Image (spheres, rainbow, N blue to C red):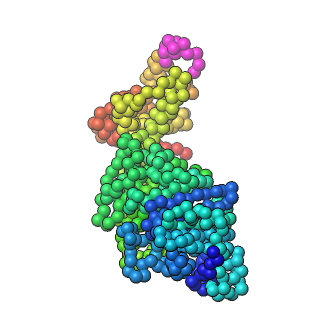
Amino acid sequence: MKNNFTFNISLSVLNHLGRNLYRNIITILGEAISNSWDADSKNVWININKNNNSMEIIDDGIGMTYMDFQNKFLKIGYSKRKNGDYKTESGRPFIGRKGIGKLALLSCAQRIHVASKTKETDFVGGVIDNSSLDEAINDDLNSQEYVLENLTSDVLTSINKLEKGTYIFFENVNEGITNTVDYIKKSVALYFRFSLLDENFNIYVNGEKIDEKMLKSLAEDTQFIWIINDIEDPFINQLSSDIEKKILKSNINFKGYIASVNKPSKLKIRGTQEKVTIDLFVNGRLREKDILRHIPTSRIVENYVYGQIHFDDLDSGDTKDIFTSSREGIISDNQNYKLFLNEVERLFKNIMNDWDDLRREKGDDGDPDNMKITPKKRKAQELFNTTIKEMKETHRHNSDYKKVNKNQLVEDWVKSLSTESEYNIPSYVECFIAENLLRKYIVYNKMELSKEATREASKWKKREEENKGIANISYDIRESMDDIYYLDMKYLSNFIDKASDKNKDPALSRSSDIYKPVRDAVGHTSIITKIAKQQLSIELENIKARVMDLMDKVK
């Protein structure tokens, strides 16, 4: 059957609207899926043939009559909402707005075959050849002079298999289909959440139904999740029961979740330069990727998080269109959108604090910019966590290792030691630095040790030799065998900075008396009491100050 379908718009206007407005295949699929949703489809089948550089999109929606195809589909700028209709016959909210979204479909391939039929009428449609269309635009033809080509027999066979619906075949996709089919499946699962509004709406890619199982690897790598206003989402339901879940409340009518993975690399979409981000959805459709770019914090937690926030009030039907012409963003000066971003910023501050606590409880590095604990304690905990992980990993690679279930008692022991390490490790380091700086000072100034100090050093040397004999060790343990390296803070401080009056003079020797027993406990890896920690901290502050005063005198 010969047709006489033409564009219901000036070809020059069509060209100026931006036939190359949409650059990626996911955006193009988004327009097709949205059209199928608006047509009350229950199923959308997407078939991709990378070898032939082609794809087809089929739905079982209400389809189009002759007049629908000519006066609605081929009328760029036609809006379903112009008569005050904001929902489909089945009650779904319309996704389409401006009526220019079909530009993505009609310009993304060299030839686009479109066929449609309703229950009551036969098929209609035609072929748009973009090379011919370019020529018509260059020749300044009017729209009535550019007539769509007739459908091929293959397309007619495909459409006749449908009781109703629409079939679109993309021949020679512009710039080729570079993405893998697996990537496209995961992207469709991530970015088209219409099933949250209507569970009877199904999308298939190359015969496989798209659902939350496509995101299994992301779910397995998820460490924590914050659920906003109690959203019901099948993706959340497949997360492990061990994952820490927190509830966040907002007075603004949106819902969703923000989650974090155990490593930033887990957000990368394999085979691409893209990563999963925190995205904004309106009525089930992705409207803005990576909303955190509008509220940057420059905090490390941004590299770990992803999520979806659904704010349907941004398009309640009769509201002003706030979506950009490319349909890949939102007009930034919209007041509701500004309030939304402010609220997300508030919630994200809570998430950043939670994340740091949860990560450290898990034995992972937290947020170094969070001042909840001192940088010194944080580094100590990180060193402890790295060490315990290396011990576990080495044990796991042992040939005799047998996988067993995690022992919670042992995990609790490790957790308690992690807490203690925040104090013990930096305290040991401070002792190490202070005592060895004093030794360097004595050697540099060629200060002669007292007889008492020499006897003390000899005592410890003898004990060390005895212990080496028991252990059958013949090599040197210490870098230097000089007496000074066998003396502790008591002798070092008396030698350098002895108080004339123990009750009045500020000197190292006064601090060393209280310092020694607690220092020895830390040096021998003991867990010390709260009061001992307080006492050692006080004395260490005095010692560090006096040592640095001495260092200032070195010429």
Residue 401, image x, y percentages: 50, 24
- Above-or-below relation of 6 to 539: below
In the rendering, at what x and y percent does residue 69 appear?
Answer: 54, 77
Of residues 301 and 499, the one nearer the viewer is 301
User: Is 466 part of what is drawn in magenta?
Assistant: yes
Q: Which of the two residues, 546 or 183, is positioned nearer the viewer here?
A: 183
Give yes or no for residue 251 being in the magenta stretch.
no
State the extent of the magenta-drawn residues as a range: 464-476
Q: Nearer the viewer, residue 528 or 197?
A: 197
Q: Quadrant of residue 115?
A: bottom right
- Number of callouts in the render? 0
Residue, x 54% and y 34% (percent of image)?
443
Near-viewer residue (337 or 180): 180
- Place of residue 314 in the rendered image (x, y in percent of width and height, measured from the top left): 39, 71
**Picture quarter with the C terminus:** top right
Q: Residue at x 52, y 70 (%)?
A: 117
Residue at 68% in and 65% down: 172
Q: Residue at point 64% right, 77% down? A: 2
Image vertical order of residue 397 relative to residue 441, above or below = above
